[in-house]
């Protein structure tokens, strides 16, 4: 059977397309599936996350210009069952090169159509914006997943992305299915909840139940060049990626059943978790834990991407909100302390307050 091809796409940058692609690929492999990840981003982040150096000589660029076929550029990764068609630094010049070719929007469709793939899934990590590479991915894919973050800017990104998908569905690829919308880097503050609710009410069942929470472990994992599901399989983000993979597999089986195809049952979730923990033991121990300064820089960079530039006051507010989201125990202690002080003040009455004021020399 031919593999199921899924593109991870959103025109907005920095909202977890690469993180979703690599974790989905590795979680699918942990479920016993074989996966090929195609890295269409010249930044090469998913190539690096899978332990492959984007300084390799040949990759997607050579594939697109017809200088190599998939078997020649595809590489094994450190994870059993996951192979990668790597991005190379030369990929940045592909737009100009492809504009010289005929039918350039269907280059990947033609390549994949003529390849005999012995794998179950092809996951395509798209770069941001609607350039020639994402169009190629959408033209070749069976399904598209849109990662989205519940911030006002990211919502705008989603609203620009949906028409692009429709454009491809109306022309290049009539069978392209919106497999789902996935909330990523999901915050629990009021604005995020409001935007999240709005998107869910607009898109209904298209949105996956699983939501990937904002979790600093993801930044630590990226710094250590590992997907979070292997770096820390029990972290909230890794668990959410595993939940999402289970949902993804389930949706795919339903889609296949409708088309009269049968898909082999995946391994159960506990077995998948066990495999991820085995990989963690094999690889994570060999790596240094990243310094807190690098993690802080990663977090600041992420906030700039999601929220744009902010004033120092706004940054302080955001840091406080994120601190309390990540350290819920501190929030509970803080609230209990405030409550305790309030009760003490009321309990002491006005006389007590007068005595306090005298003690502090305020009268
Ligand atoms: N759940 C999460 N919690 C915290 N940080 C996250 C989470 N998911 C992703 N990140 C961080 O957000 C940043 C952007 O993620 P990623 O590179 O996956 O986005 P992208 O959409 O692929 O970006 P680009 O558009 O540049 O390709 C990275 O630093 C990543 O480590
Ligand atoms: Mg990316």
Image (tube, rainbow, N blue to C red):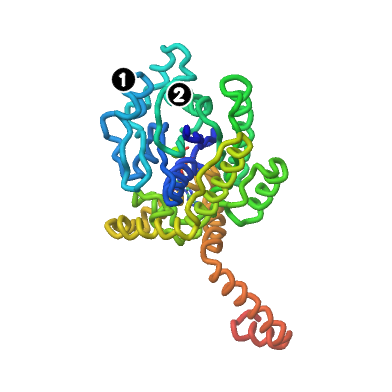
The vertical placement of 269 against 12, above or below, is below
The residues tagged by marks 2 and 1 sit, at their Cα atoms, a distance apart of 17 Å
Residue at position x 44%, y 53% in the image: 218
Q: Secondary structure at mark 1?
A: loop
Q: Quadrant of the C terminus?
A: bottom right
Residue at position x 48%, y 44% in the image: 20
Q: Is residue 185 visible?
A: no
Q: Is residue 182 visible?
A: yes
Q: Which residue is mark 2?
A: 113
The disc at residue 8 is none
Q: Which residue is mark 1?
A: 67
Left or right, 87 with reference to 301: left
Q: Nearer the viewer, mark 2 or mark 1?
A: 2
Quadrant in which ligand 2 is drawn: top left
Left or right, 161 with reference to 232: right
- Which image quadrant is residue 125 in? top left
Residue at position x 37%, y 26% in the image: 92
Residue at position x 60%, y 33% in the image: 177
Q: Position of residue 147 (x, y in %)?
A: 55, 42
């Amino acid at each position: 059977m031919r593999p199921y091809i899924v593109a991870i796409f959103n025109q907005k940058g920095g909202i977890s397309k690469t993180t979703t692609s690599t974790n989905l690929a590795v979680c699918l492999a942990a479920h016993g599936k074989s996966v090929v990840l195609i890295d269409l981003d010249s930044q090469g982040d998913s190539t690096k996350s899978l332990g492959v150096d984007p300084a390799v000589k040949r990759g997607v660029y050579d594939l697109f210009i017809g200088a190599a076929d998939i078997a020649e550029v595809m590489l094994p990764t450190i994870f059993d069952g996951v192979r990668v068609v790597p991005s190379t630094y030369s990929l940045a010049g592909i737009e100009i090169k492809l504009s010289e070719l005929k039918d350039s929007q269907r280059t990947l469709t033609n390549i994949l159509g003529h390849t005999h793939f012995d794998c179950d899934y092809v996951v395509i990590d798209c770069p941001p914006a609607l350039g020639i590479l994402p169009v190629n991915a959408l033209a070749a894919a069976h399904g598209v997943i849109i990662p989205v973050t519940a911030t006002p800017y990211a919502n705008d990104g989603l609203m620009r992305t949906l028409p692009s998908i429709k454009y491809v569905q109306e022309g290049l690829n009539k069978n392209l299915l919106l497999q789902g919308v996935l909330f990523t880097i999901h915050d629990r503050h009021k604005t995020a909840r409001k935007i999240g609710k709005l998107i869910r009410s607009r898109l209904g069942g298209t949105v996956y139940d699983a939501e990937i929470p904002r979790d600093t472990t993801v930044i630590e994992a990226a710094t250590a060049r590992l997907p979070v599901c292997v770096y820390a399989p029990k972290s909230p983000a890794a668990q959410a990626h595993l939940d999402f993979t289970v949902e993804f597999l389930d949706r795919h089986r339903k889609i296949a059943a409708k088309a009269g195809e049968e898909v082999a049952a995946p391994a159960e979730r506990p077995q998948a978790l066990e495999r991820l923990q085995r990989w963690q033991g094999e690889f994570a121990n060999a790596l240094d834990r990243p310094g807190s300064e690098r993690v802080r820089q990663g977090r600041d960079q992420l906030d700039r991407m999601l929220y744009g530039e902010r004033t120092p006051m706004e940054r302080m507010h955001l840091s406080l909100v994120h601190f309390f989201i990540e350290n819920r125990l501190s929030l509970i202690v803080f609230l209990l302390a405030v409550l305790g002080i309030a009760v003490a003040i009321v309990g002491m009455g006005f006389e007590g307050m007068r005595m306090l004021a005298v003690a502090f020399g305020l009268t």
